[in-house]
Image (cartoon, rainbow, N blue to C red):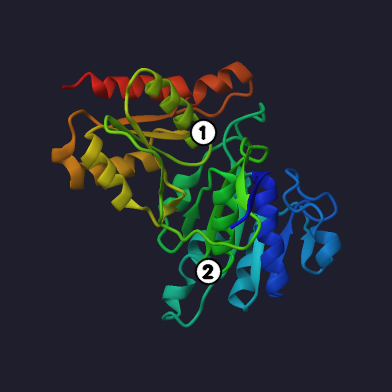
Amino acid sequence: MSAREIMYRDALREALDHEMSVNPAVFIIGEGIAERGGSYKVTEGLLDKYGPQRVRDTPISEASMIGAGVGAAIAGARPITEILYIDFAMLGMDQIVNQAAKFRLMTGDRGSVPFVMRTQGGAGGAVAAQHSQSLEALFYHIPGLRVVMPSTPYDAKGLLTHSLRQDHPVMFLEHKHLYMTKGMVPENDYEIEFGQAEVMTEGEDVTIVAWSHMLLKAMEAAETLTAENVGVEVINLRTLSPLDTDTIMASVAKTNRVVIAQEAVRRGGVASDIASYIQEEEFYSLDAPIEIVAGLNIPIPFNLSLEKASVPQAQDIVAAAKRTLEHA
């Protein structure tokens, strides 16, 4: 496949554009996503190409737009609802958790909800406590939802394409610091199936598990450790639900040490759940306690310096990996 270097946001747009071109049931609704092209320019140009019936600006009412998306999916369309900040998805949790996630089961598999909610989270840019949260654990906890968190432009296009072809509700969670990042992406159509993690670097000494923007910090940490002759295996999860435990366990069995890095607060996070799986399945492979690197259990501060201090950095991952290596 021929590939070229493009930005994460452009990779997302290519996936949206292709699916809209081949499937007239696909449409997008959200705040400022039509005339303005979205706050992060992911939907730029789609209004001119597909018109206001399929690329539609909505009022500032997350509950309404999520409800409209879920309802349209149940009725047979393939809607994408874009929520500007993941924090605002809380206004539509009843529709997501009690309707979309459960409809297929409650209809005896006769009904489906091919609904995709695109939104972004994470700290960065001093947008304060109500616009900076990493809330993936809320959706991860709910049976019936797929939770997707692409870290690279390649992942973004392939995973969004796959999401738009599913008959299940998908929470497609991006990070505000990823939109301008660049990577090699094929020009043609392709899919990345859910539940397939990627081993970014191979090593024998310690495994680092990460997702979303934290993968970039894990890769930075791996560079530092490699320069100090530490063999690091970095795993990019790509999706949280389904979770690729096979890749995680195979790596832990090889390295015998593991660091799990998440930007979200430590308490009740996905990292703790992954750690529990490792403890159950590969306890006797471990030569050191599992290390979790996570955000502080506080709201994200507005001040930039305090914001940075509240979420993990590459040096925190390096320190955690070195702690695992202290155990013989």
Tags 2 and 1 in contact by the CB under 8 Å rule? no
Q: The residue under label 2 is which amino acid type?
A: Gln
Label 2: which residue? 166
Instruction: Give neighbour class at mark 1: few <14, some 14-19, many 20+ (Cα, 10 Å).
Output: some
For residue 44, side relative to residue 15 (left or right)? right
Q: Where does the image place residue 46, in percent across and percent down from the top left?
A: 79, 59
Location of residue 152 with respect to 258 vertically, above or below: below
Q: Work out whether residue 293 or residue 61 is closer to the camera in this orientation and state it.
A: 293
Which mark, by number, is residue 216? 1
Location of residue 57 with respect to 133 vertically, above or below: below
Q: The residue under label 1 is which amino acid type?
A: Leu
Q: CA distance from mark 2 to mark 1?
A: 28 Å
The picture quadrant where one finds residue 254 is top left
For residue 90, side relative to residue 44 (left or right)? left
The picture quadrant where one finds residue 179 is top right
Evaluate whether residue 268 shows in this view: no
Location of residue 276 with respect to 166 vertically, above or below: above
Label 2: which secondary element:
loop
Residue at x 60% of width, y 67% of height? 70
Q: Where does the image place residue 26, in percent across and percent down from the top left?
A: 68, 70
